[in-house]
Amino acid sequence: MNPSPHPHFAIAIDGPAASGKSTLARHLAQRLGLVMVNSGAMYRAITWKTLQQGIDPLDSPAIIALLDRLDIQCGSDGTMSTLTIDGIDPGDELRSEAVNANVSAVSAIPEVRKVLIDLQRGYLTHSSIVMEGRDIGSVVFPDTPYKIYVDAAEHVRAARRGNDGEVDSIAQRDAADSQRKTAPLIVADGATILDNSDHTIESGVEAAIEILRSQGLPV
Ligand code: DC
């Protein structure tokens, strides 16, 4: 038998925009003592850099060339993922209207996904993680038994994003993320759906723990 290269595991949390998956993933990671990794921030960072460089977000060859020149450093502060791109942490810029409007186009480029998926998998060499995104259970960690698909009614998601004060066409972004050719948003094989429409943070975490227990996590 091949010994496992490391003792770590991943909990995959996928779902559409503003379904509450980041909040859930953050609190779940806290509760279980794991590192929370926000994979969307990585796609947002490449989008931010693309716009900053004046590159058209639809110009795939230019973005692929940019990727070769970038220094992307992914790490963690012990509880949350951290990221710098050419030495800079873009911070709140990652959630700007311009990034929201263009991140789906940039994240549909297969070469972008390949670079980021390698970085995402790299987290497991250091720690067990809760990673949230769109393709975590289907593509990044298809073999993990711990998979949750977080959904919420569209009006709840729209209200949530409005309350965050963000300008974000989530319906458009969801359509693009679900219809793209490479790694679209899907309910991964083996994932359990958690309807987050009416949960508080605490009851959502409890529901997630119940699902993970049923998937074999000893919690
Ligand atoms: O989770 P988020 O809304 O911050 O993600 C921003 C965008 O990044 C999302 O619209 C699609 C893309 N994304 C992706 O393609 N795959 C992931 N695993 C995470 C995010």
Image: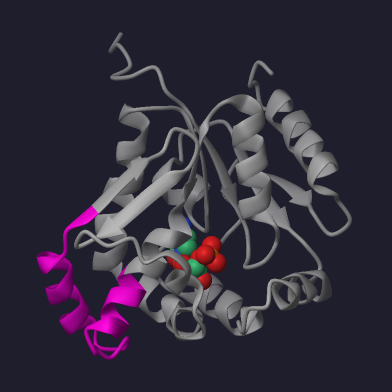
Q: Position of residue 60 (x, y in %)?
A: 24, 82
Quarter of the N terminus within the rendering:
top left
Q: How many numbered callouts?
A: 0
Q: Is residue 86 left or right of residue 201?
A: left
Q: Is residue 181 left or right of residue 17?
A: left
Query: What residue is rendered at 48% in x and 42% in y?
Result: 80
Q: Is residue 184 visible?
A: no
**Range of residues picked out in magenta:** 46-72
Query: What residue is rendered at 43% in x and 64% in y?
Result: 91
Q: Is residue 88 inside the magenta stretch?
A: no
- In the displayed structure, 137 sits above or below 174; it is above
The extreme right residue here reads 198
Q: Is residue 85 visible?
A: yes
Q: Is residue 10 left or right of residue 192?
A: left
- State the predominant SS element of the stretch in magenta: helix
Q: 146 or 122, which is in the foreground?
A: 122
In terms of image quadrants, where is residue 186?
Answer: bottom right
Query: What residue is rendered at 40% in x and 27% in y?
Result: 127
Quarter of the C terminus within the rendering:
top right
Q: Position of residue 56 (x, y in %)?
A: 28, 91
Q: 153 or 180, which is in the foreground?
A: 153
In terms of image quadrants, where is residue 6?
Answer: top left
Q: Is residue 109 left or right of residue 175?
A: left
Query: What residue is rendered at 44% in x and 70% in y?
Result: 94
Q: Position of residue 157 (x, y in %)?
A: 75, 70
Q: How is the image coloured?
A: one colour
